[in-house]
Image (tube, grey):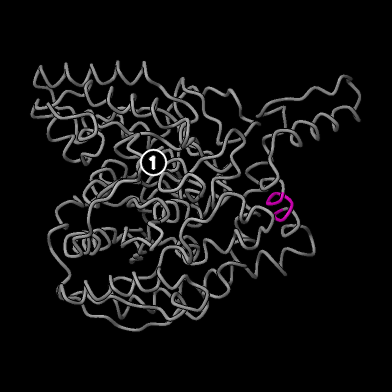
Amino acid sequence: MASADELLYLSAADQARRIAARELSAVEICDAYLAQIDRVDGQIGAYLTVTGEQARTRAAEIDDAIGRGDDVGPLAGVPIALKDILVTKDVTTTAGSKILDGWIPPYDGTAVRRLHDAGAVMLGKLNMDEFAMGSSNENSAFKVCRNPWDVTRVPGGSSGGSAAAVAAGMCAASLGTDTGGSIRQPAALCGTVGIKPTYGRVSRYGVIAFASSLDQVGPLTRTVEDAALVLESLCGFDPLDATSIEQDVPRYRDGLDKGVAGLTIGLAAEYFADGTDPEITAAVRLAVEVLERAGAKVAEVSLPHTSHALAAYYIIAPAEASSNLARYDGVRYGVRVPAGSTSEASLLDMYRQSRGSGFGAEVKRRIMLGTYALRSGYYDAYYRKAQQIRALIKRDFDQAFAKVDVLLSPTSPTPAFPIGAKTDDPLAMYLADVFTLSCNLAGLPGMSVPCGQTTAGLPIGMQLLGRPLDEMTLLQVAACYEREAGLPVTRPELP
């Protein structure tokens, strides 16, 4: 029998294979992860809700189905946890906000349902920046989430809980959402693999909206194979999502052994500018050399409008957020703070109190920014201009991908930074996503892969960006790097 520690750090693909072969039981693995959550999550803070009873019941059902010879799906028995922005039937869903505290949805989102259909076992809901607004997971309304590699540092955001739970062995894989880098950046800071698919590749039905033209669901895992396995289960057309793309889903795992011979990797000068931590730049340059030795060609490209991406994003995303979050007023949705009277003035006061106490500081900041940008007289000067910049950024990528197959860059300009280091400087916090924002504005697939550690032992991530609907090539390159680099498998020393 495998030890508890071995079970925790088996890849999701290995777990699924061994459960299907009846070498391990789904209940055994589920219990090992629940025990790990009990042991370490008090220090990490990755979970907002643990669904232990439901998970054990589901795991037992998987074991019984395998015993009967039923088809249990490619993720049969694999314990997975979900960012708390994904709607889950009969399980509290808060989006990390007090305004939704205690809300229990009556249905599952499409991504949740597809994981269930694939045989996964849900362990619970994960900590996050409120309404996915943040780069450090310090904006959660409930508790701080810490980086398992150094509990004095942030795990990244907004899917910080999703990355921390995988890194700390508290689930085999997790789901996050990525609006401006919120899967890739925490994956880089916590030493996991994270992939954001092409916009529309995975249904957004059942995802509590932040910025509807940018949000996308994707997996965080320990290996590239695991990312491919989970992504296969998530992708596909959904008539419940008007932005869903009707496109066949490849079997992503089939491309993992193809290598990189014949592929051209693009390096954009704008992604290797001053200001990036020298250890990160060095690690990413070494990764490029690994891929060159494996047969890839390298070419220099330019993305000239990259410098405008941050400004465009922080007009478009808050503008969409101000619209999406208008529904949380204490009447239609959200916790109501009573005003104590029935007068019209009291009604307005109830709105103010409900939203004022329900939303955190960062959410209020973005609602105000977005509302300002959409005001009459300002729309053309700000929002329309930002959308024009967005079109230019997309054109830059189209021109680059006419010459190269994949773009490679650092994922984050710095390793995980200390908790509290940037909370008083919103602009410094926003700059943490400077390499990831453009991908969302252009609707492209992107992923982060571990590519080393700093001298202080903090993870470093390498970002890969691809053509629309070409997740296969990203996974192919990432798998080749993972194989050829031969980086030692390291685990955080947990408290």
Residue for point 35% across, 31% down: 113
Question: Is 466 situated left or right of 44 in this image?
Answer: left
Question: Compared to 235, does 69 lie above or below?
Answer: above
Going by the numbered disc 1, the residue's amino acid type is: Leu
Dot 1, how many residues are within 10 Å of its Cα: few (below 14), some (14-19), or many (20+)? many
92 and 40: which is toward the camera: 40
Residue 44 at what x, y percent from top left?
Answer: 46, 37
Residue 173 at what x, y percent from top left?
Answer: 31, 40
Question: Compared to 258, does 352 lie above or below?
Answer: above
Is 386 a magenta residue? no
Is 367 a magenta residue? yes
62 and 333: which is toward the camera: 62
Residue for point 81% across, 35% down: 352
SS of the residue at dot 1?
Answer: strand
436 and 379: which is toward the camera: 436
Question: Is 38 situated left or right of 338 in this image?
Answer: left
Residue for point 40% across, 22% down: 51
Q: Main secondary structure of the magenta part?
A: helix
Q: Mark 1 = which residue?
A: 175
Query: Quadrant location of the C terminus?
Result: top left
Residue 52 at what x, y percent from top left?
Answer: 37, 20
How many numbered discs, if any?
A: 1
Question: Compared to 13, does 343 lie above or below?
Answer: above
Residue 246 at what x, y percent from top left?
Answer: 33, 50
Query: Quadrant location of the N terminus?
Result: top left
Residue range highlighted in magenta? 365-370
